[in-house]
Amino acid sequence: MDSGRYFKMFLSFILLLFILASCSYFKAIKKPEVKPAERIALPEIFTDNMVLQQKKRCNIWGTAAPGGLVTVQFANQTKKAIVKENGKWLVELSPKKAGGPFELVVFGLDTLRFKNILVGEVWVCSGQSNMEWTVSKAANAIEEIQQANYPAIRLFTVKRTVSPVPLDTIPAAGWQVCTQQTIPDFSAVAYYFGRQLHKKLNVPIGLIHTSWGGTPAEAWTSQKTLKTLPDFVQKIQAMEANLDSLKEIYSSDQSSFELLLKKWQDKLVALEKGTLSNQLAWYEPQLDISSWGEMEVPRKWEQQGLEGYDGMVWFQKKIVIPSSWQGADLALYFGPIDDADVTWFNGIEVGQTSSYNLARIYTIPASAVKAGENTIAVRVFDHGGDGGFWGEKIQYHLDCPAGESIDLSGEWRYQPSLDLAKLPSSYQRPIRPSNTPSFLYNAMIHPLIPFAFQGVIWYQGEGNAGRAYQYRELFPAMITDWRQNWGQGDFPFLFVQLANFMPIKPEPADDAWAELREAQLWTLSLPNTGMAVIIDIGDAEDIHPKNKQEVGRRLALNAQRLVYKEKIPYSGPIYKNMKIEDRKIRLYFDHVYQGLKAKGEKLTGFAIAGIDSNFYWSDATIEGKTVVVSSTHVPKPIAVRYGWASNPVCNLYNSADLPASPFRTDEWPGMTFGKK
C-alpha cells in the first residue's frame, strides 16, 4: 500500500472524528422550547355547527399571547403556528372533501373545542334589504318555515355593525343548524339559494349572511379601492382627515349617531312649525283640509304623485264611531310607515315610531273617543328613499274591546309640509353610518377575511338607483376589491338584477332603474360572474318582492352551471348585437338555448327610434333565434330598447322559461338620470 493511500485514509479518519464531535456538540445545544400559547381566542366566525369549505385550504386564525405555540387538530390533521409579536396566529388546513360531523380542537395552555363541524360548500350572501328580507316576511312563509328541517344547512348572520376603520372581530350569534326555529329570521334569498344547492349537490351548505337594508355599494367597498374612483376620492380623504371624530360619532352601537339624528329631526320639526298655519295645528280636527290632496293607504307616496319626495307629509282621515264605543280604550293599528310617524287622535298625540319596517299599534284613551265624527292625523317623516304608508290593507284598522273594527285603509287626505330638497345646507341630514363609504366593508366584510368559501351572492342596487353611470365603475370595483382583499382569486360572484317596481309608464322614456339594470348587465364582463334576471316577479307597489323562492332558484341556476359545471340553462336571453334591415332591426341574443318565446299573446316591451332619438312602441316578432322590431312611426330605425322602464311590460323568454334582461342598443347623450 503506497504512502498516498495511507495519507488519504488518515484524512478520512480525521474528518470522521470531526463529524462525530460536531454531532455531539450540536446535540448538547438544545433548541429553545416553545411553550404552549396562552389566552387563545378565535373570531366569532368559528363556532359549533360551522361549515368549512370543501376542496380548498381553510384558514383557522385568532389571537394569543405572543411567542406561544398554537396547535390545531381537525379530521386527522394537526397544524401548528407560533403566535406573532402582534398577537396573531394562523394555520392552514389541507383541502378535504365534503363530510362530517367533525370536531375542531385548538389548544395551547387553553383548549377550545368546536363540535358538529361539517365540510361542504360555503357562500357569502350580502347586499341590502332584499337580501336581508327574512323567510317570515316572504311568500308562503308558514309553509316554508314548517318544512325547514335541513340539518346539513348551516346559517350564520352578521349583526348590523359600522366602523370607520377595518375591524378584526364581528358581532354574531354563531352558526346555527337550519330548523323551524332558526329559519324565520334568516335571509330568504340566501336560504332558498342554499336549499337548492343542497338538494342538487347533496353536500352540506354554509350560508354567511351579511347585509343591511337601504345601503349603497360604496358602503361595502374598502377605502383603498374607493380612492381609485374619482367620485369618491374627496369623500375618503375627508374621512381620513377626520378619523378621530368619526370614531367618536359613528360608534359601532350607533348611539352617538342616533343622538345626532334626533337633534336634526327636532330642528326640522321646529322649522316646519314655523311654516304651518298660525291658526290651527295640522293635527287639529277643526283644520280646513278641503284643499288637501287624496292618497290611497297603504301605498307609498312615490306611486301617487310624490315621486322623489323626501320630507314631511301630513295625513288626515275622518271616521264615524258608534256611540257604543264611548267609554272604552281603542286600539289603532297601522302597517309599517316609511320612515317615522307621529299620530294624533282628535288632536291628542297617541304614539310615534321611528322605524320604516315596523307595524304600529297605538292605544286611544277613552277620554279622546266620542260618538260621531273623529279625526286621525299622522305626520310622516321620510328621511330618504321611499316614503309613506305601506304593507297590507288588513293591517290598517281601529278596534274596540267588543271586537268590532273600522277599516282605515283607502282614501286619506294629505298635504306635504317640508321638502328636504328645498332646505339650505345647514339643515342637511347627517349621513347614516350604514350609508357611509367603507363603513360596512370595515365592520361586516373585513372581519370575515380570510375565511375560505366558494362564492358570493349579492342582491343590491336600489340604494344606487339614480347614479347608474357611477355604478358602472363602482360595482365592478367593489367585486374586484373583495376578490383582491380575500386573496382567493376570482371567486364566483353572482348577483340579482333589479326587479320591476313602481307604476307602469304608458310611453317609452328615460329611466333611472333601467339604467341601473344596464350597469348590472355590463358587470357580467368581469370573469366568473353571473346574474339572475327577475324583471317578471317584482311588485309595482313594493320594493321588496315577496317571491324570494324564485330569486334564490335563479341564483342557484347560475351557481350550478358556472361553479358546479352542470350542463343546464342558467340565464335568460342576453342581447348580443343587431342588424338594420331596411325598415326593421333584427336582434341577436346569447342564451337562447332551444329558442325564444313570448309569454302571452303578443311579444311586448320593445321600443324603436330613428336618428331623432324619439322612441315609439314597436311591433316585435320572433323569427328563429332572433327578434325583428319595426314601427310605422320610424321609417329609418337605428336603435332599440327592451324593458326600458322601472316597471316594464315585457315578456321575452327563452326555452328554459328564463326572462330576457332589459337592454338598449343606444347610448345617446342627454340622459337625465344616472350622470356623475
Image (tube, grey):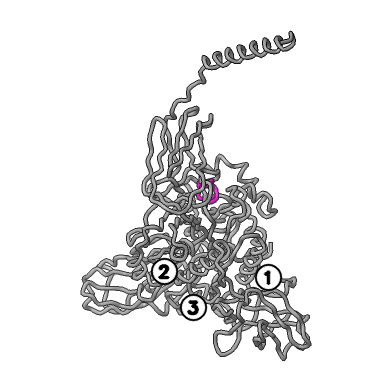
Considering depth in this image, is 454 or 65 the residue closer to the camera?
454
Using the image, tell me which numbered label, if any, was put on residue 293: 3
Q: Can residue 266 be seen?
A: no
Q: Which residue is denoted by mark 1 in the rendering? A: 672
Q: Nearer the viewer, residue 85 or 429?
A: 85
Give the SS element for disc 1.
loop
Q: Nearer the viewer, residue 45 or 431?
A: 45
Image point 52% across, 20% down: which residue?
31
Q: Residue at x 68, y 11 (%)?
A: 11
Q: Main secondary structure of the magenta part?
A: helix
The reply to whether callout 3 and callout 1 are in contact (CB within 8 Å) is: no
Looking at the rendering, which quadrant does residue 140 occupy? bottom left
Spot occupied by residue 640 in the image (x, y as percentages of width and height): 70, 79
Residue contact between numbered discs 2 and 1, judged by CB atoms under 8 Å: no
Nearer-N-terminus badge (2/1): 2
Residue range in magenta is 439-451
Front residue (pair 167, 625): 625
Closer to the eye: label 2 or 1: 2
Spot occupied by residue 330 in the image (x, y as percentages of width and height): 27, 70
Q: Position of residue 506 (x, y in %)?
A: 60, 84
Q: Is residue 285 a member of the stretch shown in magenta?
A: no
User: Which callout, 2 or 3, points to the residue nearer the camera?
Assistant: 2
Residue at (56% x, 39% y) in the render = 244
- Describe the element under mark 2 as helix, strand or loop: loop
Q: Which residue is mark 2?
A: 138
* Mark in the foreground, 3 or 1: 1
- Left or right: residue 483 versus residue 278 is right
Dividing the image into 4 quarters, which one contains the C terminus? bottom right
Q: Where is the N terminus found, in terms of image quarters?
A: top right
| Distance (Cα) linking label 3 and label 1 | 28 Å
At a point 50% along the width and 50% down the height, the residue shown is: 444
